[in-house]
Image: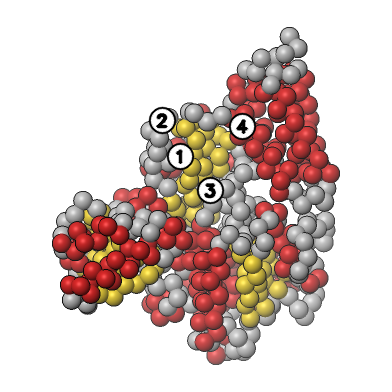
Amino acid sequence: MTRIYVPRDSAARSVGADEVAQAIEIAAAERGVDVEIVRTGSRAMLWLETLVEVATPAGRVGYGPVAPEDVADLFVAGFLEGGDHPLRQGLIDELPWLAAQSRITFARVGIVDPLSTEDYEAHGGIAGLRRALTMSPAEICDEVTESGLRGRGGAGFPTGVKWRTVLDAASSTKYVVCNADEGDSGTFADRMLMEGDPFMLIEGMLLAGIAVGAREGFIYIRSEYPDAVVTMRAAIARAYEVGWLGPRVLGGERQFDLTVRVGAGAYICGEETAMLESIEGRRGMVRAKPPLPAIEGLFGQPTAINNVLSLVSATVVLARGAAFYRELGVGRSRGTQLFQLAGNVACGGIVETAFGLTVGEMLETFAQGTRSGRPVHAVQIGGPLGAYLPASQFDLPLDYEAFVEAGAMIGHGGIVVFDDTVDMAAQARFAMEFCAVESCGKCTPCRIGSVRGVEVIDKIVAGEDRAANIALLEDLCDLMTDGSLCAMGGLTPMPVRSVLRHFPEALHNAKDSQA
């Protein structure tokens, strides 16, 4: 029997993966060929989807992008034996795009059956949990702290320090919450991880629960990710069946229960306190800090809140040790980050690499230029509230401190590429407009400032008293940065300021009607 791997990741399904799998099944039956089709996650080489892999004695050979109408020709070409065909990509593990990466959190994605606990264990899963069960909560927190792991959701706060704060909080009831409300433009790593390796997130939640003394956790997933919701719920049910979740985790004395909660489409619920409000059944609105959620979070109890990539990275730390993880990266940015290449790129997808690669190296080695064939003019890194970087800054290393010093942020690792046809004034306006639409409305600088920002940018573009309005826009950015209750309003000025600083011609060249 020949094993064939076809992704069921939603990106692959959107371009016909289900139809390709069905066509292979039908063609094999017609030819009397015995095949097993395994639906995996995606290898995240999105320009090759639907990517079909065939297990051969030499390794898994890939073909892509495959459409249903290509299947008959693939059988004729002998693809079940790795035969030659125009769509043949060769041995997947040897493709330069993948070989140049350091895939440790994405090591199983695209390789295993996402809902097979046997596959998960066979490929190194649960090792971190087994080790954690032999350690005290404080030792787990110390190990994670020593690794240098920082939150991958954007703020970059040390994960071990956060866990230790919750552990030390005086309460008999504590919670762990995973923020999977991946709303930033150009980001999809959380989704692909949940759809391609859900047990890794479950293991990460278990580790966090043991470390902080929590017996219950929630995974908050945005409603726009229906496939991820279905996959996570199925994986959680399976984890209960095999004893990874429930009253006796792995047959021991630990208890941990896990539930998926689905958001309702509000970007602001990616902010941790607004997310807590939503989980508790209220409208997602930002809470004032202090108190911090680590002290008074979900249902008023100490709560460890981490995003998907932080939690799955912790499983690597516990399985392979803090020293292994710390050896990757630079400065205070240790380990790997999942960078997501999107926008006008020839090769979009997930790149997992240690911190320290430059923006230019990322674009050259992995994005491989623009899809349009035109020069790259700007990249936005860190989501819709991230800065726009010009070509002159492509030597900037991808690490937290270097980006902060440059007035930018890595955020969740989204990299959106624009060619030289982009209207940078429109991009600056979009930042303010986005904030105006998505603001929870609790604080005035964000709620009103973003609306005024759109109006001021429109006046500048129209040439109305340009110099005065640019000065007003700068003042407005200061006010929003300093006065907003959360990062929604506080970071909205970042992309606007980056346009003013790096692409001044976009706003300064408007004809001044008052001249």
Residue furthest top in the image: 515
Q: Which mark is residue 426?
A: 4
Tell me the CA gap for discs 1 and 2: 9 Å
Answer with mark 4 or mark 1, whichever residue precedes in sequence. Answer: 1
In percent of width and height, residue 456 lies at: 75, 28
Local crowd at mark 4 within 10 Å, few (<14), some, or many (≥20)? Answer: some
Residue picked out by circle 1: 344
Answer with mark 3 or mark 2, whichever residue precedes in sequence. Answer: 3
Residue picked out by circle 3: 186
Mark 3 lies on a secondary structure that is loop
Answer with mark 4 or mark 3, whichever residue precedes in sequence. Answer: 3
Mark 2 lies on a secondary structure that is loop
Kindly tell me whether residue 242 is visible in this rendering. yes
In percent of width and height, residue 215 lies at: 67, 80
**Which quadrant is the N terminus positioned in?**
bottom left
Residue type pointed to by label 1:
Asn
Residue type pointed to by label 3:
Gly
Answer with mark 1 or mark 2, whichever residue precedes in sequence. Answer: 1
In percent of width and height, residue 484 lies at: 79, 45
